[in-house]
Amino acid sequence: MKVGVVTFPGSLDDADAQRAVRLGGHEAVALWHGDHDLRGVDAVVLPGGFSYGDYLRCGAISRFAPVMTEVVEAASKGMPVLGICNGFQILCESHLLPGALIRNHHRRFACVDQRLRIENARTAWTGGFTEGQEVTIVLKNGEGGYVADEPTLDRLEGEGLVVARYLGEDPNGSLRAIAGITNERGNVVGLMPHPEHAVEDLTGPGTDGLAFFTGLAVAAFA
Amino acid sequence: MLDTVSVAAEDPRADQPWADLGLKSDEYARIREILGRRPTSSELAMYSVMWSEHCSYKSSKVHLKQFGEIPQETPAGAMLAGIGENAGVLDIGQGYAVTFKVESHNHPSYVEPYQGAATGVGGIVRDILAMGARPVAVMDPLRFGPLDADDTHRVLPGIVAGVGGYGNMLGLPNIGGEAVFDETYLGNPLVNALCVGVLRHEDLHLAKASGAGNRVVLYGARTGGDGIGGVSVLASETFDAAPDGTSGAGGPAKRPSVQVGDPFMEKLLIECTLELFAAGVVAGIQDLGGAGLSCATSELASAGDGGMHVELDRVPLRDSTLAPEEILMSESQERMMAVVEPGDVEAFLAVCEKWDVEAVVIGEVTDTGRLEIDWHGERVVDVPPRSVAHDGPTYRRPSTRPADQDALQADVAEKLTRPQTGDELRETLLRMVASPNLCDKSWITDQYDRYVRGNTVLAQPSDSGMVRVDESTNLGVAVSTDCNGRFARLDPYTGAQLALAESYRNVATGGARPLAVSDCLNFGSPEDPGVMWQLAEACRGLKDACLELGIPVTGGNVSLYNQTGETAILPTPVVAVLGVIDDVTRRTPSAWAGEGERIFLLGESREELSGSEWAHVVHDHLGGLPPEVDLAAERALAEVLVEGVGLLTSAHDVSDGGLAQTLVEAALRHDVGASVALPGDPFTDLFGESAARAVVTVAEGDADALVELAHRHGVPLTPLGRTGGSGLSVEDQLTVPLTELREAWSATLPAVLG
């Protein structure tokens, strides 16, 4: 499959996401924030970083990037979209996912090897896992605390839309230890941890992140 | 009224504030002699910043010169660019080159810890970028006052957040560094920043403006009032009244103005600049750092073959009220200057526009041999560029071995009371691992992104940081920075060599072959003859050691006036060594991963306790002579470590805290314990800090091969025991569960810093 990786000004993990896409067995296609063009891709990754410096609210400017018009429209038709870290923040700002991400409760940037539990293995991006599987992938953020109002959180829980949850010590103050969520259709996934940094034993804390890319399913969500 | 060249010629006796700008009277006289008239205020601004200690190295140059005597060749071949460029460039094979450099940003980081540290990272990254290289990793050796001091609680969190905040936003992995605490750094923290960059040989770019008619383009952030005079004021004088009376003695205190960084702009600048290189539209390039436009214009012009004409009013400003002098001195961050052939200007500007980076043609290269700068059509600067950039004063300042050095060296730590029993050793071990310099540093390093770019093979707490350079061939480089300032205080010659030896060793433990050195020489006031002696001795020590190890100094930085009142910091010659490894998949990790492996000590242990962490922690003692340096032994040890790649399952250097600390760190990383037996006196074996040592492990069946390898290189080898279990046991002496060690080791920083 052709998987697009968007580069915004200030994107940092775009090259890493492209590598993960390739290691996952797909073709990586570079997408540019300023283009109204998805170049015929089958899925899109919004990578981590600090788009536009995140000097305003994380992701608040990127949601207005020309390419996001196309991403939002494609997502509404079922195209798989994975937002990682800053990408998750952009998805929330774009209202493709509910809630928001705020500063870590300890007020520091934190880069750690994080234990997670995969709670939903039925999304376009998590079919390579089994429900309840525990994995270790990299978590690194300054504003990774997931928040939403209580009814929204209850709905996410009730409808099984929580994709991954933090295990062990609370790394960033996320409500209900939420590390990632999906939309009702299951094609849009936002993750605060970085699976693209856990795709090679040589450079990451293992290869648990690879299944997000090898397990990418397109047809079922269109 | 605008002070133009013609005004200066007509009014030769006008009073000028040269003293307030940090110039001495003979320096001012020299400027008048060069120009044959008084300088304009703009020229005075340029000379004052460029002739400051920070830019001109006027006190250290006579000592740094000797690094030029070291052959400019690494064990992998000739240097592609050496000292004098923004950073040295070395060949690492397969058509790749790397460039690396370590610099200081000490004073600004005391004044405003976050921005001081942040812009320190930004500055070194632009240096590396200006060589044509993609920056691929950073490292930050840091020094703080005592952990329990109030001001450390102000300075440390800010500096760490600044290093992280800037480097993380650039997408550069932070792969190592140091965090050291000593009372002499209270009021004078050290923030040194290192960057490594990678380029193809053909992409090397040099800072020169050649070819009359070529355009001079300023691009990046707009110029504002930040950091005006920052270079001369912050780096050349203490914060108190100036000791030479130029502005002190009751005069107004100089108000340092620290620059504010915009890492997002720098990230754009990096990507934009790399795309400009790739498009082949850059004829020459220079970053703007200390001394801003004064430095960039004069250095580019003097390195070229002609002159330069600049229309200063074209510089995009953040503050429209800035005067030409201020524009020339401004240290606004995230700016670069390029020399571009006329036919390439359009393509150049198009790339900048793609990255939303403002770019303006502000002048052109000329054949006049002069640096000429106009302000709205009137000439405000007309100077020989070399006189600004390179002909600054040099001083051979008085240098005297301090009177108390003999007494200090006579007061040896070997006579201090030592633990006698196994129980006392156990107690000492737990106290040592929890001490600020030896404890777990993850409170600091977890604030840095070590994973971005996906090429980090080793990072803190490993001995060295290692990054993959080529994904298809697995070629990689490793870097370490080290310095024990206490050793340097006891004997600066030996101390500097020990810093180099440790860094060299740390690169080798990962399996990389050490190639080259960059150094950041942090010292007190050069006006103190005792400090000058320390600097001179450290430089001499480094040069001699580099000659013996066969590796060149490729560049670096000197930071002076690091003192609070009369108290100078420990002399701190931080040494960075870079090495190359052909296949990073074969690197040797620092910690134990498997049970039942054989543990060996490589190298010779002596009763060397003076300057040790033990003497510092337990007795608050500093005296005696530092451990002996044996560079032949270091070289032999490195050979074993490099040749042992694939055979060794782990290798960890023995340095601060001695063998005890090495064993604890190797065990705690993956919770693999060990049982060891010590060959000699248990206390000196555990806490002595003899150099040229490392602890290695091999699989049971590989022990003979290791013995053969060590013998072949003449490296003494002592079997210590085996890995395994959930504790660290020293035969007949002590046993400590790893959980207890971890608790002691990891609690220290969070308990104080939150």
Image (cartoon, rainbow, N blue to C red):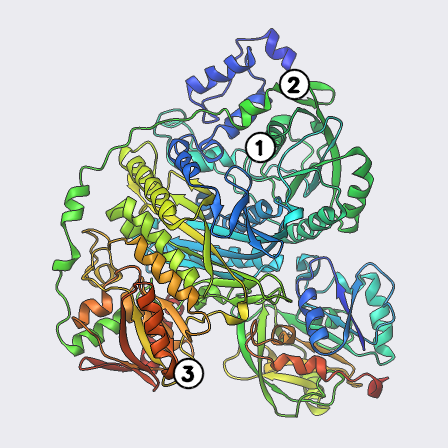
Residue marked by disc 3: B594
Instruction: Pick the residue in front: B721 or B179.
Output: B721
- Disc 2 crowd rating (10 Å Cα; few below 14, some 14-19, many 20+) is some
Residue marked by disc 1: B295
Q: In this view, does B417 lie to the left or right of B522?
A: left
Q: Is residue B442 left or right of residue B330?
A: left
Q: In this rendering, does residue B108 appear at all?
A: no
Residue B70 in the image: above or below residue B472: above
Please provide percent x and percent y for residue A68. Answer: 81, 66
Task: Place residue A121 in its image quadrant.
Answer: bottom right
**Whole-number angstrom distance, CA of label 3 to CA of label 2:** 74 Å
* Circle 2 SS class: loop
**Whole-number angstrom distance, CA of label 3 to CA of label 1:** 54 Å
* Circle 3 SS class: loop
Q: What residue type is labelled 1?
A: Cys
Question: Do the CB atoms of the residues marked 3 and 2 lie less than 8 Å apart?
Answer: no
Residue B705 in the image: above or below residue A215: above
Chain letter of the residue carrying label 1: B
Task: Place residue B57 in its image quadrant.
Answer: top left
Name the front one of labels 3 and 2: 3
Quadrant holding the C terminus of chain B: bottom left
Q: Which of marks 3 and 1 is nearer the N terminus?
A: 1
Q: Which amino acid does label 2 sit on?
A: Leu
Task: Place residue B628 in its image quadrant.
Answer: bottom left
Please provide percent x and percent y for residue A211. Answer: 67, 83
Please provide percent x and percent y for residue B425. Answer: 19, 74
Residue marked by disc 2: B2
Chain letter of the residue carrying label 2: B
